[in-house]
Image (cartoon, rainbow, N blue to C red):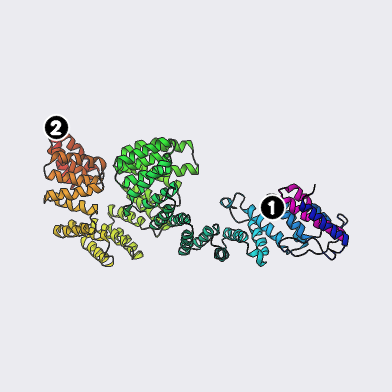
Amino acid sequence: MKSPFQAMIHLLVALCLGTGTALAGSTGPVAPRGAAQATPPQKSAATPTPSTPPRLAEAYYQFLLGRYEESEGEIDAAIKAYQQAALLDPGSAEIQAELASVYARQNRARDSVAAAEAALKLDPENVEAHRTLGLVYAALAHPGGESARETTPGKYTTQAISHLEAAMQRPDVAAEPSLQLALARLYMDTSAFDKAIPLLTRVLEEDPDIEEAVPTLAEAYERVGKQDEAARVLDQAGRRDPKFYASLGEFYERQRRWPEAAAAYGKALKQFPANAELKVRLAFALLNEPDTGEAARARDLLGDALKSSPGDGRTLYLMTQAQRLLKDFDGAEATARRLMNVQPGSLWGATALAEVLADRHEYQKVVDALEPLVTKGAKDKPGEESAARDLKPALVQLGFAYQEIGNFDRAVATFERVRQLSPNEVTSEIYVIQANLAARRFQTTIDLARAARARYPDDQRIPRLEADALRQSGRVDQAVSLLEAARRAHEEDPTSRLALAELLTTARRYADAGRVLNDALARFPDEVSILFQLGALAEREKRYAEAERVFRQVIERDPRHALALNYLGYMLADRGERLDEAVGLIKRAVELDPYNASYLDSLGWAYFKQDRLDSAEANLRRAAAGLPRNSVVQDHYGDLLFKLGRYADAAAVWQRALDGDGEEIERAAVERKLRTARDKAGTR
């Protein structure tokens, strides 16, 4: 039994056949979507094309039947009807175009292309055929969706653009948002941002609720360097729909604009307070701005996220970073070990643990934790890019640990591996240069730095390392000339002047250092680091009252300036003045950085001056262990051990002082003390 719709079609056809005039003069079935009529069919030996109204009416019937069958979900029957219509009226471009559309909707790309191309042979301006071909080729250009684009724009992208542009010559088609978006994405693929931006802007002006257009337009602005416009698009969308604040946060994250990223994620989280991913993202942004004092907030956010995903490795790793910033090293170690249990085969847990151990200056433990894992990782997956990425952070930690315990050959070799993993990254070059400088391989350091300067002329760290190597090898004038040139090249950067002043101070060219620093302070009056270095210079010149005045200015501006607290406390203690105040100042520095071996040395030395030998011993021992190559620290510890009557131990420590960096000690005086200790210990 026929449905009412089929009965209606048959009635229509009967009327057409009965009159013989209903389609008289017609060139084919009337196509949907207002398509233009095709030219009259031509006879063909292969496919007869009768021009009588009954054949045209039958073609129209099959066309309408195909529409009905498709609406009922009977796709095979619909295709069969369209094919029959095409046989009855082979000159109709509209029938071929409609058949192409059906094939496209069934993901039969090859058949769709064939039918659409057949339509265009009959009518080169057929809008539906261009529309279908444009969408099919766009899909072929993105076979797995937007995340699986052609590696480089290829023939599918080019053809898709050509056909969509042709289809959109007609105003009603040009107004279709789906086509506008498809064409805009193709413009993005070909970096035709000047075409994508106005098209996407028009889409959003006509309908601001078309969500897909928002991130695409923001990306287009970002790609052409209009960062403020990109942020504006996402911010406006966020006001309509708060979920776009997360996209805004991601945008700022890519720009490394961490305060703005945190603010955007905060707005998104306010609307979606249970979203664990937003909590982690916000915590990550907060942790990238450690000076804001938001580490506690980041820790709390991560703690909430871990309640819903207790085994998430990324969240656990970030938690270790928050705990480290809060000086909760016991908590950070516990979290790192938890991460190692959750991901036993990953280096991230071991790297997190190593970072905590390095904070405590327990460098041998860092080596013990990382060395076997790094070796195993390199053997298990040699040459794999993902494995290399996993290895790199661990290798960096391991290289610094080797350097701190004085195993310079291993340090250099480890950083060379890092450089091989990142051959075009300046930081990897700097690691190698630093390791050679620590090993006192001055000419090698100079050669490496000069080569690196040629590759990275704007990186100020490289000439500073080269200048330090030149100074330590006795070529002070060359070092000064190098940093003078760097200062001239970076007039608006205060660190260029600070580096030059530090070099001049170390070389005992105090007057020159003073001129550089005073000039820097005049240019950058709010830079506390310049004021601090002026205080250090005054102390080196034995202008102690001036040094104290300047250090107190620094502390007044920044009560948490640990360097100034330590320097002032040590200066007072070393001269035996106001020892209680000295201890108080240094304790404040230690509270800010409890495992800093230099601060522990200062505190131990102040206690030594107070004759509080037990307290002195606890701090000086830790300092000596943390800075085994620092000659001054070893000298202090030797003085304490000698006073305690531990002469053999004192002799061993003074020998380490002589074997260390040699900085800031009177070598002859240490040698005399060493001989005395050996005499008393009877170990000559």
Q: Position of residue 299 (x, y in %)?
A: 35, 46
Can the viewer see residue 509 in this picture? no
Does the segment drawn in magenta span residue 259?
A: no
Q: Quadrant of the C terminus?
A: top left
Q: Position of residue 353 (x, y in %)?
A: 35, 40
Q: Position of residue 421 (x, y in %)?
A: 45, 46
Q: Is residue 269 above or below residue 232?
A: above
Can the viewer see residue 228 in this picture? yes
**Residue interval drawn in magenta:** 53-81
Q: Amino acid at mark 1?
A: Ala
Q: Is the stretch drawn in magenta largely helix, strand or loop?
A: helix
| SS class, disc 1 | helix
Q: CA distance from mark 1 to mark 2?
A: 96 Å
Does the segment drawn in magenta span residue 64?
A: yes
Question: Which of the 4 image quadrants contains residue 623?
Answer: top left
Return the residue nearer the eye: 443 or 610.
Answer: 610
Residue tagged 1: 104
- In the rendered structure, the answer to whether residue 620 lies left or right of residue 477 reads left
Residue tagged 2: 682
Q: Amino acid at mark 2?
A: Gly
Mark 1 vs mark 2: which is more N-terminal?
1
- In the rendered structure, the answer to whether residue 407 lies left or right of residue 55 reads left
